[in-house]
Image (cartoon, coloured by chain):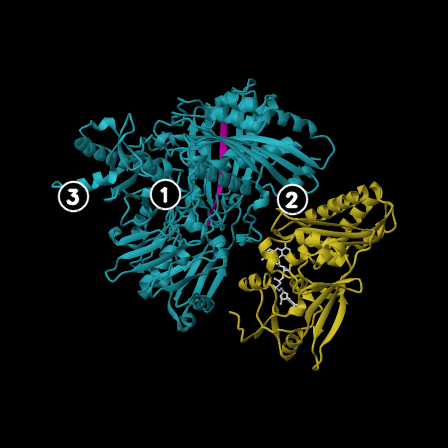
Chain colours: A yellow, B cyan
Amino acid sequence: MAEIERVLAPASLDEAAEALAAGEATLLAGGTDLMPASHAGKVRFAPMLINLRRIAELSGIAVEDGELRIGTLVTIAELLGDEAVRERCPILAEAADHFASPQIRNAATIGGNLCNASPAGDMLVPLLAAGARVELASKPDGTLVRRVLPLEEFLVGPGRTRRRPDELLATVRVPAAAPDAIWRFFKSGTRPALDISAVSIGLLARKAGNALHEVRIALGAVAPTVVRARAAEATLEGRVLNPETMEAAACAARDEVHPISDVRASAWYRKELIHNMLRRMLSDVAET
Amino acid sequence: MQIIARETLIGKRIAKLDAPEKASGKTRYIHDLDLPGQLYGKILRSGRVHAKILRIDTSKAKALPGVHAVITAADVPWQRPIGVARDHLPLKTDRVRSPRDEIAAVAAQSEEIAQAALRLIEVEYEDLPVLTDPLDALAPDAPLIHPEPHGADGGTEHLKPGAPVAYSGRPDNLAMTFDYEQGDVARGEADSDLVVEDTFRLHYVTHCCMGVSGIIAEFDSSGNLTMYSNTQVPFLHKREFAEILGMDPARIRIIQPPIGGGFGSKLDIYPFEPICVFLARATGRPVKLVFSREEEFLASPTRQPVILKLRSGCRRDGTLTFRAVETIHDNGAYTSWGATTPFVMMQTVSSLYRVPHCSYHTKAVYTNNPYAGSFRGYGNLQATFAVESHMDRMADALGIDPLEFRLKNAQDPGEVTPQGMQFKTCGLKECLKSAAELGDYQAKRRAYAALQAEPGRFKRGVGLASMLHVGGGAKIYPSDGCGTILKMDDFGAVTLITGASEIGQGSETVLAQLVCEELGLPLSAVRVVNNDTEITPWDVGVHASRTTFIGGNSAIGAARKARAKILDAAAKQTGLPAQALDLRAGQIVEERSGNPLLSLAKLIRSLHFSDKAELVMTTHYYEPPSHHQDRQFKGDVSAAYAWASQVVEVEVDTETGAVRLLKVSGAHDVGRVLNRLGIEGQIEGGIVMGQGYALTEELIVEQGRIRNPAFRDYKLVTAPEIPEIAVRFVETLDGEGPQGAKGVGEAPAICIAAATANAIENATGVRILALPFTPEKVYRALREER
Ligand SMILES: Cc1cc2nc3c(=O)[nH]c(=O)nc-3n(C[C@H](O)[C@H](O)[C@H](O)COP(=O)(O)OP(=O)(O)OC[C@H]3O[C@@H](n4cnc5c(N)ncnc54)[C@H](O)[C@@H]3O)c2cc1C
């Protein structure tokens, strides 16, 4: 049984960081990962439980310095309905549209998804493709400090991040997409709704004529954490999309991943999907 | 005075009587019931696939404050085995055969304390060789799951003096066998121009009732036991519990709170039920034991997994000649109803179409896997999948349109099949034609087949399949009957006391409707009482699609007796002959003119408050005119048979293997539509259940362990996947059915998987012999074909 001794519901980031500095704590946002994991006996609660949901400054979406600043408590439903997100990071809105069910979307937060760091997490793929950074807050010696890490560095492995125990995720910063950006998101599962990804792909690039630049491809559920398909990106960089380049990129992506087999899919099928769907996304892009 | 015309409720769209309570969340399911002084029961399961129990130490758990009892097999040396083959002791003594096996149980003041106590129980095991492939289990040197000559747990240690010998065990791993023959298969094969053979593999799925399993058991001070139970068969269970508990059946009362779904899962007694009774006995308190969802996945039964080898033959002109089936049923560690699904499977094999020569052989084999129970369709989804896949294969091989091929071999009314089934009404041909028309089957099939080889990511296909299922009960017990008590109060309102249980299928509503039809009353005038063995008359239970048919005829019988009594009394008062009178809208009217003569309520009161004071109370017991099968499995087991054909249209994504159901067009011989809303719901729900079986649902069992005991990874169909559904009712007006109706509870789920297989073949040219058609499986099959 969970031995929770104290439950805190701080009203400010400062208070939360202070409480965190005082000792080991479990952080609760929407609870949609935490509660099922605790019922399954997969998490041990720390003596202190901190409910983050009353911290107003951790919610809300703003645009600053051309960047989207998304508070950690922003729910998937809020992302879906937000004009700024749709305009500046449409791939994120698209991924939100494939996320769970309306009930879960109302509770699940973007920060919870990132901190949970599942390789199948649906926010990770578009954010990695978009070059997002995360802002972590802590109060080591009485003053609130923030550090910013690229998402790619933040994610370490399944359920593991660079977040220190005394830190909490405050904000997600996403550079706005270029005006000539193209984007595609794909998620595969047994059914179209309420499914955990067996494979997911995010594609973001700038398109000039029929050539792609600054190609970024993120893959979900094929490695211990969400990864970039750098070999595939390299085959596409600056090239014109044609059947040969698209096939080469699809093959490169398939060959550079080493997924596992589990209840959702076999490694072989995951690789096949990466190939087929990346090629499909690229030919889709070529046609528009 | 106002003329009252005759009105009927038959065929109308009537909302279920319990809908307002359910929709507003007010229904009190077993989860919502709490008795004063109640304790909470929890079960410790083995978590081992196959092992000897070396030691159990419950002392720490017993010492935990709030714990009232911790029991193991040692505390109930008199426990008796349960299940269809009586091979299953509720609390295991010296051996566990699957991870779900019950080792110990706790009753405590709260669920949390009970849970904590479970963690304090120490058990030491010694692992035994694991048997998880039924084919391996048949090998001569295979480890034995129930070695003889011992008790249910395989060892001798527990056979203490005075303890009942549980199960005598077996020298092999054969739990049950079924052998059926008709005609001469060898001759049939010699007569054939075409023979096809395939091995089909059917997987594990489970019921996923919204309401999980649960029970509350309580003894009164005189030793009488009351169980609040979700059972579908209260009267059979009353008797069986008496046997298991060594009690006088007269001291056992079963009350069914509203049941959150059954689908066959609550047709057997499972260990948690006697265990809860043991705990109630040990503590002298009411004990409530309700499963968690994970426990429901791990420890409630599955649909029967089957390896089915089918050999079928026909002549060049498309006449079927023979069919030979051999199946291996993975029985799991214990025997429940799943092992007996051959009863139904062989009916489809022998009698869905006319086949002169047939053989059917099943071996149900013990393994350390989960065990299967009864599940809507009862083996028929499995058998129909194989038979209807072959109907398409043969039609294609002969170059005959599959619809024509089926029509050529379809049963007609009046047919008596070699298995002894008598089809007094039979709408199969009409179902076939009607479903084909509704789904534009023939034209689409040709068009889609022509597009198979064309480039393109998405391929479409249509598939057709039909089914036969019992529709007038099934006489597998000494009686297949149902009793009714009907009483009318002084105001003309009826209490209908029926043995027929409501498990969400809408039986309450349809029974009330049938009574109203006889008595000329609005639905609001009827209350149904159907959930207490102390009150209701006997009934077999909810299974075999029987409740509307059997319970309906029983209710009609009681209502007709009441009607006769009322009209006799009215005849005396009005001076008109009873035949000239009718009951309409709560009035006695003149039959021909509709002129109201007397209010029903007044008539009843005048009967009651007279010199010869009398009440209108009637009883009826309906026993269908069906027969037990003989030892060769022959006989007319049901009073009527239901038929259906469904056309499924799919779209296959050849780059991912994902199959989308676009449309299901069904034609169902339902005898007659009684409650249109109810039957539409029943059919749509059944189709979606069949869709889950075909496409998404699979209980993944690896090395005896269930890998996905949660809705996250056990994938039920969700709303966006539900296809367009078009249904036509074929009304064959069965002479024995209530108002002509037949049972349809199981029918709609049965042929979806088969039709989907045929549709995928039409779309892609690839035939897949194993379910479910998950994207990966379909993709793999497409790749292997290329
Ligand atoms: C039915 C169901 C369907 C789902 N479907 C999907 C899906 O389609 N796609 C998908 O990606 N996920 C899915 N999930 C998983 C889950 O909903 C998401 O990962 C969600 O984003 C988690 O957010 P939360 O706010 O609920 O996190 P919580 O459960 O509250 O927290 C998750 C983890 O992050 C930590 N945490 C939360 N906030 C912070 C913070 N600010 N700083 C530091 N640590 C923090 C918590 O301590 C915990 O370890 C599903 C879950 C369920 C139950």
Q: CA distance from mark 2 to mark 3?
A: 74 Å
Which residue is disc 1 drawn over? B508
Which residue is disc 3 drawn over? B609
Point out the image quarter for the C terminus of chain B.
top right
Q: Nearer the viewer, mark 2 or mark 3?
A: 3
Whichever of labels 2 and 1 marks the residue nearer the N terminus, that label is 1
User: Looking at this rendering, what residue extends furthest in the top direction?
Assistant: B317
Task: Specify the quarter for ligand 1.
Answer: bottom right
The local crowd at label 1, few if under 14, some if 14 to 19, many if 20 or more residues have their Cα within 10 Å, is: many
Task: State whether discs 2 and 3 lie on one chain.
Answer: yes
CB under 8 Å between discs 3 and 1: no
Under tag 3, what secondary structure?
Answer: loop
Which residue is at the front of the view, B470 or A23? A23
Query: Is A243 in the magenta?
Result: no
The residue at the point 64 percent across, 60 percent down is A75
Counting every numbered tag in the picture gives 3
Q: Quadrant of residue B42?
A: bottom left
Magenta range? B323-334
Amino acid type shown at disc 1: Glu
Image vertical order of residue B596 relative to residue A85, above or below: above
User: Looking at this rendering, what residue extends furthest in the left direction?
Assistant: B611
Point out the image quarter for the N terminus of chain B.
top left
Which residue is disc 2 drawn over? B776
User: In the rendered structure, the residue with mark 2 lies on which chain?
Assistant: B
- B6 on left or right of B673: left
The residue at the point 69 percent across, 78 percent down is A139
User: In the rendered structure, the residue with mark 3 lies on which chain?
Assistant: B
Tell me, for residue A71, which label it has, or none: none
User: In the rendered structure, the residue with mark 1 lies on which chain?
Assistant: B
Kindly tell me whether residue B93 is visible in this rendering: no
Q: Nearer the viewer, mark 3 or mark 1?
A: 3
Image vertical order of residue B433 relative to residue A208, above or below: above
